[in-house]
Amino acid sequence: MTDVFVKVKAQLEKQLPFVLYAKPKADRMIALFQENDSLHFLKDFSEKGFVFAPFDGDAIPYIPQAESEVYVEKIKETDFLIAPNPIIEADEAAKRDFEALVTAGVDAIGQGAFEKVVLSRKAMVAIPSFELETVFKKLVAFYPTAFKYCFFHPKIGLWLGASPEQFLKINQEALQTVALAGTQAVTDSTQLVWQEKEIEEQQLVTDFITQSLSDKVSGLTVSSPYSVQAGNLWHIKTDIAATIGSNSNLEEIIKSLHPTSAVCGLPKAAAKDFILQNESYDRSYYSGFLGELNIDLATFRTEQTDLFVNLRCMKINDKHVELFIGCGITKDSVPEAEFIETVNKSMTMRKVLN
């Protein structure tokens, strides 16, 4: 057990907050260990530390750098083989319920309530035991291009994930973000063909981001869409860059984007309303955002923010794990196909639990 995991174990035993994470393609992992069990919330987005924001609500927890120890540890070579997809027992009740939810979403789109809505569900997986070090090392080994994390607070719980999606990256005035949508399972076929539904869904996300930022930035540039692999899935991705305007601030930019149409829908307010009224559970921190706020914790450089969308994530309980999975719904969505997409997305976390 390395130094960082010795400290993780001690924090858990003392019920003290911490976060352990590795950025995409990084050769090191970073940990922030809070020295007390206080639950801190952002006040004006000028704070420095690691933020863990929910999908809904203004109370945004964070672990302050000023009240924490920082560890940086080299990632060692791992010998985990890429695991095959686990066999999932059919859950007819979950399938029926989610397909009914998707049908309601498609009907609402047909009635003009919104153009797109992102609907999700929670799956419970029984675990006889859970070894955090092993699971986190699997996340790092299996998903090198994702943002891998383990976040714990005694008042929030233990969360892990491997997100493929950058929410926002800022270096002084330089801003970067991405539009990521559309999903296909990786297969042995060499031909990847995107359907009109998937292309349209991704374009809606791109349009939402550029429109949200248009009055807050200058020099906005948007790449052509391209395919990117995340674990066992393909997505369509667009890179977006800009310079933050002199009259804009971090809080305004974050609030204009969150929740993005990639996790909520368009128009945002109507889609979010539908989600809150029709999903049969509380998303909590799933589809929120997380990451470094106003500081690079590996170098302690300030005016650096590096945030990711909290996707492909799970919450660990005593004898079971809660997996959170969703998909974008448009007028052309087929309920059964959307359920299968959620099953495919659940593989990201199920693989590391095997």
Image (cartoon, rainbow, N blue to C red):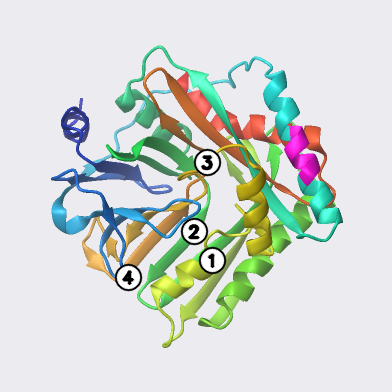
Task: Name the residue tied to disc 1.
Answer: 257
Task: Name the residue tied to disc 4.
Answer: 44
Instruction: Identify residue type, mark 1.
Output: Leu
Helix, strand or loop for disc 3 = loop
Task: Name the residue tied to disc 3.
Answer: 282
- Which one is nearer the viewer's eye here, 59 or 296? 59
Q: CA distance from mark 2 to mark 1?
A: 9 Å
Residue 41 location, quadrant:
bottom left
Along the horizontal axis of the image, is 12 left or right of 227?
left
Foreground mark, 3 or 1? 3
Task: Name the residue tied to disc 2.
Answer: 167
Foreground mark, 3 or 4? 3
> Whole-percent x and y of residue 283?
52, 43
Q: Quadrant of the N terminus?
A: top left
Kindly indicate whether the residue at mark 4 contacts the one at mark 3 (C-beta within 8 angstroms): no
Helix, strand or loop for disc 4 = loop
Q: Residue drawn 33% across and 31% down? A: 77
In magenta, the rendered stretch is: 99-104
> Whole-percent x and y of residue 136?
36, 31
Seen in the picture, residue 181 relative to 212 is either above or below; the reply is: above
Q: Is residue 195 visible?
A: no
- Which one is nearer the viewer's eye here, 265 or 28? 265
Kindly indicate whether the residue at mark 1 contacts the one at mark 2 (C-beta within 8 angstroms): yes
Q: Residue drawn 20% across and 48% down? A: 38
Q: Main secondary structure of the magenta part?
A: helix
Seen in the picture, residue 162 relative to 221 is either above or below; the reply is: above
Q: CA distance from mark 3 to mark 4?
A: 26 Å
- Which one is nearer the viewer's eye here, 352 or 75? 352
Residue 303 marker: none
Helix, strand or loop for disc 1 = helix
Q: CA distance from mark 1 to mark 4?
A: 16 Å
Instruction: Identify residue type, mark 3.
Output: Asp
